[in-house]
Image (spheres, coloured by chain):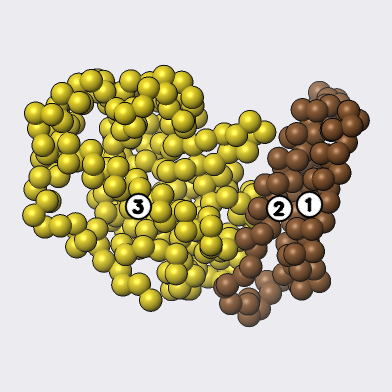
Chain colours: A yellow, B brown
Amino acid sequence: MPTNYTEAEIVRPELKGLLRRGKADLLAAMSPTPQILQRGEILVQMEEQHDFVYAVESGWLCRSRTIPDGRRQIIVVFLPGEICGIKTIFMQFQPDAIEALTPASVRRIHYKDVCELAEENFAVAMHLAWQLAQDERHLHNWNVRLGRANAEERLAALLLEMRNRLTALGINSAAATYGLPLTQQQLADHVGLTTVHVNRILRRFRDLGSVVIRNNEVVFLENVQMLEDIARPVQDLVGE
Amino acid sequence: MSDTKSERPDGQTAALAEGEAALWLSESLIFALIEAKVLDVDSILEAIEIVIAAKQAEKAEGGGHSPAIARAAVAQLAAISSSIGAATRVSPPLTARKPRRRPTRPD
């Protein structure tokens, strides 16, 4: 059974200072005025040209892809403090959309400025690589879940992943509850299920006394251990 | 006093609502039947595959109402099939069923 570490424990100690400095220097170079987004607003259009990298200041964003017949997959969720759109440095056209799941604010930097900054500041380059590695880690987790996990494991893993990521980012300090501003449709689009199926599993988790979602708030109940047990086989080393 | 006439959905909205309600109800019933071990997942997936194949054949033959509707219907069926494919349960059985609530009566 996998051991759970904190994110601070798995990062190489000799890199921690460098990554912190890189993030600070990158944020300092971004536009001073935040761009405000409404819920559902598209920041990066799918298959269109885009030139900016963003830092999420507040709210939740996601990378998503809608296929021509209307089915949609939420690929990665971006939380406050994370950098998104790094692929714009390398690619003129973006394969996926980035959209606001909640009202949000972001600050941005042109890809050419990021390149110049990364060239003169190794810490910034390493922070960008770190963020890509984080995104890749999340994608690996979801690759395993969507390929091999059943519906209960996917949903349990998602609810615990968001709790653990919010805690690691210092956004959530209470272990028993956190705000989850996603609709059941958005949850379904992330875990590759239908809304009916998500609703059914959430009712089951509630009836088993492990977790309930009320008014966009996830509340872990007395039997949260059951949820942890369901998710554990498809969680990574930091419980995400 | 409310104007009940103005609250009545137009024909298209009513048809869409009926379609959505029927689809969601069918899906929910399928999950209930799987959970009660009346049906197994493989049989359901095969049944959905048959419907998808029939819909695609209809589209290829130029039948049906509209290619766009047929395509959207196939997408809906594919999403349901994929979701049902993940329906194996790992959580323990519920020890006690909650008492059933009486259905809400419309005012």
Residue A30, horizontal then vertical, whole percent: 20, 25
Would you name the residue on which mark 1 appears?
A: B49
Q: Secondary structure at mark 3?
A: helix
Sequence-earlier tag: 1 or 2:
1
Asked if residue A12 shows in the view, the reply is yes
Q: Are marks 1 and 2 on the same chain?
A: yes
On residue B81, the disc is 2
Q: Are marks 3 and 1 on the same chain?
A: no
Query: Residue type at mark 2?
Result: Ser
State which quadrant residue B62 falls in: top right
- Relative horizontal placement of residue A20, taking residue A230 as reference (left or right): left
State which quadrant residue A186 falls in: top right
Residue A90, horizontal then vertical, whole percent: 31, 28
Q: Split into 4 quadrants, where in the image is the C terminus of chain A?
A: bottom left
Query: Residue type at mark 1?
Result: Glu
Q: Residues within 10 Å of mark 3 (few under 14, many from 20)?
A: some
Q: Are marks 1 and 2 in contact (CB under 8 Å)?
A: yes
Quote the CA–CA distance across marks 1 and 2.
8 Å
Quote the CA–CA distance across marks 2 and 3.
28 Å
